[in-house]
Amino acid sequence: MSGESVGFWILSLISVFSAIMMIVTKNPVRSALNLVITFLCVAVFYILMSAQFLAAVQVIVYAGAIMVLFLFVIMLLNLGSPEALIEKGTIQKPIAVGLGIFFVVLLIWSQALITLPQAESRAEVTQFQGTVEAIGLSLFNPKLPWLFPFEITSILLLVAVIGAIVMAKRKV
Amino acid sequence: MLEKFNHLFIFPEYFHGVHLPSLVPYIAVVGCVGFILTILPMLIWIERVVLALMQDRSGPNRVGPRGLLQSTADVVKLFFKEDARPKNIDVSLYHIAPSIAVITSISAAATLPLQNIHFEHANGVPFTVPLTAGNVNIGLLYILAMSSLQVYGVVMAGWSSNNKYSLLGGLRASAQLISYELAMGLALLCVIVMAGSLQLNKIVDSQNILPFAGAPEILRGSVLCWFWIRSLIVPVVVYTIAMIAETNRAPFDLPEAESELVAGFHTEYTSLKFAMFFTAEYVAMLIVSGLNAAMFWGGPLPPLNVVPFTLIPGFVWMIIKIMGGVFFYTWLRGTLPRLRYDALMNLGWKRLLPIGLVWLFIIAGMNLGTDLLIERYPAVKNLVPQEARFTEPEAPSSASPGQADAAADEPEPVQYNALSNPGQPAIPISRTLPARRVR
């Protein structure tokens, strides 16, 4: 068992545990922090797969920016005691359980869990494919199909920013 | 004679069968952590003495010579204080928060470039290994990621203390961190565009050049080649303002404004937990000053390429530059009043961010325009900094895993070696176009 797989199993235990805790915990701040742990574990998975740039971006964007905003909103809303948040007598819980079981059955039935694709290359070979230079060159290469979606996405973000400003500044 | 002195610093690759270059990262780890933890009491002393000098009072003068042992006494006092704990706190978060603050701030030091150590192969070929704990391809992003994780220590402390002042301090701190991170990132992007790499050692290397063709060798890697002037001064100003706001120091110390919030997010912390927040704040100061030094002020490069400066090893220059940053912090604290909160946000979002965006455009346009001009009039090449750009990605190696590992460990030989052949322009003047423009 290589060091890589040892790291993988330890981290996957931590990440799955904190993901479950994120759902189970009643305190909203704690469940947000559990989600942060999951994100950090995913970042380390990226490093194990030699995708350094992706790992750094994962930490900066998800753990560093988005989850901080989540925490912000949770704290500012001041949700009061966690017990008040528990919904009683709704139909949501049985539907969620039913859909979950249906999803697992679907996965087993379609054999997606059994016929996982095998990795074609090793980490030693792909260690240069995750660098910033490699990602940038393939992202902006006009011969590869990723330049157009990338630019379109940036326009989408710009539209979202303008929309947010318009919504916020309507009553000035 | 000086030649011989210089050769003392070139180490053999194998010393009694020990591969010395592979020991370098461990030396860097021990050096970084040791330096940070030993300089901390000194840092507090420096701050208090400089502040006292600026405010025309005597400052610490009871314990030790010139109050030098005052910080030691304070640390001992903090160790033996009672660990008071308020009621109705979120116990586990309350205890984890100080350690998260310290861990994230110290671990950001891992990719700071301290020095290049010179080695010699058995066949006499010199090569250098950077004295860095983790010389990774994404060094700068790593530091930014760690500094963005620092919010969690503050937010968790503020939330778990069950105190309205703590909560307000935590919220203010995180809002400030998020908004100034953008301006900071844009200022750093200007440098990245010019250097063409995120690896801090390569950014330092790309400042070790001649300012223009035919310049005297004394100017190689000198003050004129550092990015503070090559990026036309504005990014370093933006970064310096943003770094002070990032570390929540005066005049941006709104999260711990004594007159409004008692002590901000660490109001409810006592004894060693309070000391850990204190440590985290000062370490963060060191780290952002170090990043400033590496990105804009040449890192371990001496200010002039002549003998008395070049004999001082690089990490000493790095420490001198970091201490310059710390002095600047103290200077601002002694002179400027605290900003109002809306003024702080206005400065971040309405001044620094647009300036940073516009300057990024200007720098990128300047780079592109120089390339086009050189394509048209090759004589222009002599006027611009004679740099070697790092645009080519390293080719994926198809060697067997063992060999690939060995290749990854082995540092690439650099052409110019400041110690072994002073006075020779060894970097060939080849200004290649960026790869994206090659069709």
Image (spheres, grey):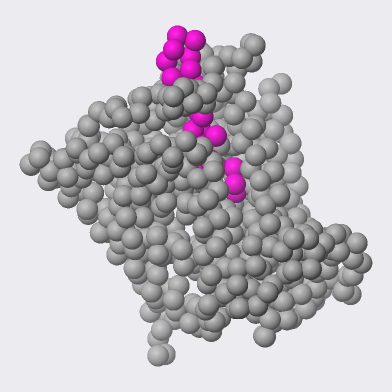
User: Residue A92: percent from the left, percent from the top?
Assistant: 70, 65
Taking the view exactly as shown, the residue that stands out farthest to the top is B123
Taking the view exactly as shown, the residue that stands out farthest to the bottom is A172
User: Residue B15: percent from the left, percent from the top?
Assistant: 61, 14
- Say above or below: A152 vs B133: below
Q: Count all numbered tags in the image, as a single digit.
A: 0
Q: Which residue does the image show at 57% across and 53% down from the upper left?
A: B287
Q: Is residue B107 visible?
A: yes
- Say above or below: B422 vs B312: above
Residue A41 is a magenta residue:
no
Magenta range is B108-131
Taking the view exactly as shown, the residue that stands out farthest to the front is B1
User: Residue B279: percent from the left, percent from the top?
Assistant: 71, 58
Left or right: residue B408 versus residue B396 is right
Q: Which residue does the image show at 51% across and 13% down from the upper left?
A: B403
Observer-nearest of A128 and B388? B388
Q: Quadrant of residue B355?
A: bottom left
Query: Which image quarter is the C terminus of chain B in?
Result: top left
Q: Quadrant of residue A26?
A: bottom right
Observer-nearest of A51 and B288? B288
Observer-nearest of B336 and B242? B336
Q: Is residue A35 visible?
A: no
Left or right: residue A129 versus residue A30 is left
Observer-nearest of B163 and B264? B264
User: Residue B29: percent from the left, percent from the top?
Assistant: 65, 38
Q: Which residue does the image show at 39% across and 68% down from the upper left?
A: B353
Q: Which residue does the image show at 65% across and 32% down from the upper left?
A: B26
Query: Which image quarter is the N terminus of chain B in?
Result: top left
- Say above or below: A141 vs A59: above
